[in-house]
Image (cartoon, rainbow, N blue to C red):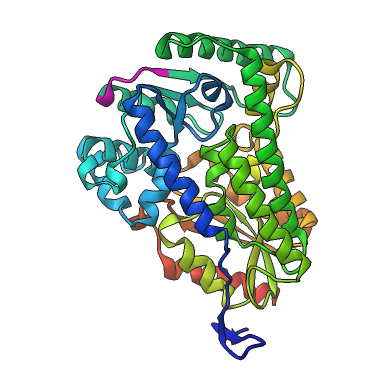
Amino acid sequence: MPAESTRNSSGTKEKAYRKLNSSKLLRETMTLHILSTKQASQAGRLAWVTSGFPVEIPVAFDVTAAYPEQYGAIVGSDKCGPLLCGFAEELGFSQELCSYARSSIGSVHHPEQSPLTGLPKPQALLACNNICGTVLPWYEAVSEMTGAPVYLVDTPPLEGDQPPHHLAYVRSSLEGLIEFLGKTFNHEYDQDKLQRVAEVSNEAVTLWTRALEACRNKPSPLNCADRFLSMAPIVSLRGTQQAISFYQAFLAEVEDRVKNGVGAIVDEQVRLLWDNIPPWFTIYNFFNTLAKQGVVFPADSYTHAWSASIPRGEILKSIAKVYSNVYLNKGLSAKIEKMCTLIKDYDLEGFVLFSVRSCKRYSLGQMVTKEEITRRTGVPGVIIEGDMVDSQQYSEAQAQTRVEALLEMIV
């Protein structure tokens, strides 16, 4: 296996993993977004939204969106998860509850001890249960603490194709959302503006998707940590020009790496698939430790979930269809099929399933998934256990040992 660092053509030492030059632009973009959420809160135009919410609609109402799940990633990266989750547990919330929810509730309860002093106070809480069922009671709890009203876009789970009555039901929920936003923010609905926002959203999604697909190349221009961090604008700034500007620069760097044969890691030897949210508190250590062994993750199920565009046509019907068909709202067979396709398309030699204690919807059925993927593709996989925010539920040594066992089967 390669060493921690190698010497490049100039004779200087080079780390086993390469940093993206666009990381600086990412920091600047997200810092400006954080400032915009504070300004929007002061102006009475901030909504907290769940990660799978049809954000194009509030954006068309000139409402700024803040994402508690993304804030949870910040909490995890700052290693404040146990502290903030503990605050929620002191209020009576179970340790079994999603750590995004616990850290969010904890930050509202004790903003003075939270990164960035927590998210700014919302004027509305917009939830969509296409990612999990926890979002509604989570937002109801935050509503009691902040006074902000809650609106739920209900997207019943799908098994196979979406039937007409299902689509009509979700569309009616979007119509209710428009009425709710109009009353809450004293703003009239403009269908033409929503169409324009959707087109802006699609442009950013196209750039993001091209960057993901570039990882089919060998060596892969991006590793898993690169994508997890660089996905921030496609989540929180979708439907805005800022997202387009960032991903234009991001894609240019990715394509430049491909053109010059530069990989995300210095000595790519093994290509693996990652499934689930990452452990944010150790994201660099986990993936960079494996990079030193020549292991790269050219694809994952999580960041690829943000690559769906809103098709042209009747706008609310199109939005209802896209947001009903997100990765986590579909059955186990669809998830298995998606991962098998990624393994084939990205020429991967194995896979790692992260069983996240907090995220029941994402982690459900991973034992069956592991066996079925190996049966279909012939490549081995491993399950590691832990959490995305609460580091108390994770053992670095155990995770590394299990991945080492997987590598022994491949190399």
Q: Who's the residue at 70% across and 71% down the image?
A: 262
Residue 127, how many percent across, how many down?
A: 47, 25
Is 405 placed above or below 254 here?
A: below
Q: Quadrant of residue 397?
A: bottom left
Q: Who's the residue at 35% across and 24% down the image?
A: 43
Q: Quadrant of the N terminus?
A: bottom right
Which residue is at the front of the view, 107 or 276? 107
In this picture, residue 70 sits left or right of residue 371: left
Magenta stretch bounds:
145-150
- Asked if residue 316 is among those painted magenta in the image, a careful observer would answer no
> Looking at this rendering, what residue extends furthest in the bottom direction?
11
Q: Quadrant of the C terminus?
A: bottom right
Is 216 placed above or below 161 here?
A: below
Residue 184, how many percent across, how many down?
A: 40, 12
Is 264 placed above or below 113 here?
A: below
Residue 67, how many percent across, how many down?
A: 44, 36
Which residue is at the front of the view, 88 or 191? 191
In this picture, residue 260 sits left or right of residue 264: right
Q: Who's the residue at 58% across and 22% down the image?
A: 155
Would residue 302 be seen by someone viewing this image from the given angle?
no
Residue 319, how many percent across, how many down?
A: 66, 22
Q: Who's the residue at 25% across and 26% down the image?
A: 145
Would residue 86 be seen by someone viewing this image from the given angle?
yes
State the count of labels. 0
- Asked if residue 149 is among those painted magenta in the image, a careful observer would answer yes
